[in-house]
Structure formats: C-alpha cells, structure tokens
Image: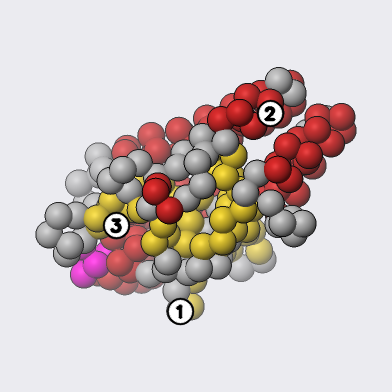
Amino acid sequence: MDERRGQGVTRVLEALEPHDAGEAAVILARCPAVHVSAGEPHFRSSLPPAALLLVDDGFCVLRIPRPDAARSVITCEAGRGSVLLPPADAEVLFGLTESRLIAIPQEEVDRLLRLPSVARMLFDRLAAMLGHKQEAIGTFAATRHVERVRRKLLELARSYGRVGRDGIRIDFPLSHMLLAEMIGSSRETVTRSLDELQRRGFVARRGHKYRLLISPREV
C-alpha cells in the first residue's frame, strides 16, 4: 500500500484503542490500495484478492447490470470509512467520485480480528452495512414512488449527510438515473417524484447534489 492515507483509514484508526490503532496501521499498510476513477468499472477479477474492502476515500457503489442493459440495480453504496464485501460475480464496482479502496486479504482480516477494538469496529461497520441493506429492501414496500425516493434520500442523509444551517447536504453526485437504480424505478419516475418533493419543500437540488430541507432530528 502506498504511503498516502485517506480519511477513511484515518477515521478507522481514530476510533480504536491506541495500541490496537498502531497494530492496525501496520496491517493496513501491507494491504494493496485500489484506485478507482469516477465511472470506471471494476469486476472481482480485476481487484486484488480480498475478504473485505475499506473505502479510504471517495464514494463507490456495487451495481448489477440488467440483462436488457436498459437499467441496472444498485446493491450497495459505500462512503469513506465504510467496509464492504468485494463484488460478487454478477456485480460491478463503480466509483461515483475518484475513489481509493484498501483491499484486505483474509489473512490480514484474521490478524485485525485478534485486536479487540478492531474486531468491534469491523462488527459495527458490517452491522451498519447490513442495516443499510435491510432499510433499502424496506424501501420497496412503499407503493408510491415518491415515498420510495423520500425514504432513500433520508437513508443517504443519515449515512452520508452533512448537517448545515440550511439543511442536510448529500455531497456525492446523485443523478436521477443513479437514484432510480437504488430504488428499482425508472429515471422518468424519479424525476417526477423529485419535482413533487421539491414542491413540498422537502429537498432542494443544485446540479447533482441534494440538500434535505429538514432538521437533523427528522432524519
């Protein structure tokens, strides 16, 4: 791994006990880094062998292309400090922004798990990822697409939002098509739903960035 350390690794190490942080830093320094350009696809075969991926910088998604190629489905999204599984055979890893991931081989995962505070951290991050997936599946229970979009925006705000005086910003690029792939809808339906949510005063848009016009207590 090169000497550069992004915010993802820094956040992980800062959350650990001092002794464990030092040991974990040595272990992670041995792991290969993967640089993913925005929009660049990475299949499992193009990544170093790994049991876990740690997002050191940027924002990535796992996507399953549909057979008809008309629409894909997002199965996972991950920002800085997130831990995720490598893509399955049917999945493709994409960077929404310039991203850097740490590929952690199984033997290094085993060493990390021997450090108590690292084991707790990995459990917490994997549990959070499982919670996101359960919440994403629950979104499909909403029959109205505008409600699906609203729930997904709230989920993204909880996980990756930045609280400001004017609401909660979702700072990674979120196109209508990407949001459609996250909720199993069409781009046109998402566009109409976002228009309705903007009329309600729930969300504001600037380019591909969104701001929820709510207080943190409502997330």
For badge 1, the amino acid type reads: Gly
48 relative position to 188: left or right:
right
Q: CA distance from mark 2 to mark 3?
A: 34 Å
Q: Position of residue 152 (x, y in %)?
A: 39, 51
Above or below, comparing residue 75 to residue 203 in the picture: above
Task: Identify the disc placed on residue 181.
Answer: 3
Q: Residue furthest right?
A: 18
Q: Earlier in the sequence, mark 1 or mark 2?
A: 2
The disc labelled 2 sits on which kind of residue? Leu
Question: What's the magenta region?
Answer: 186-190
Between circles 1 and 3, the one closer to the viewer is 3
Q: Please report whichever mark, 1 or 3, sits nearer to the chain's N-terminal start.
A: 3
What secondary structure do most residues of the magenta stretch adopt? Answer: helix
Residue 13, percent from left and from top: 77, 41
Residue linked to disc 1: 207
Amino acid type of the residue tagged 3 in the rendering: Glu
Q: Which structural element holds mark 2?
A: helix
Marker disc for residue 112: 2
In this rendering, position of residue 137 left or right of residue 210: left
56 or 195, nearer to the observer: 56
Q: Is residue 93 within the magenta segment?
A: no
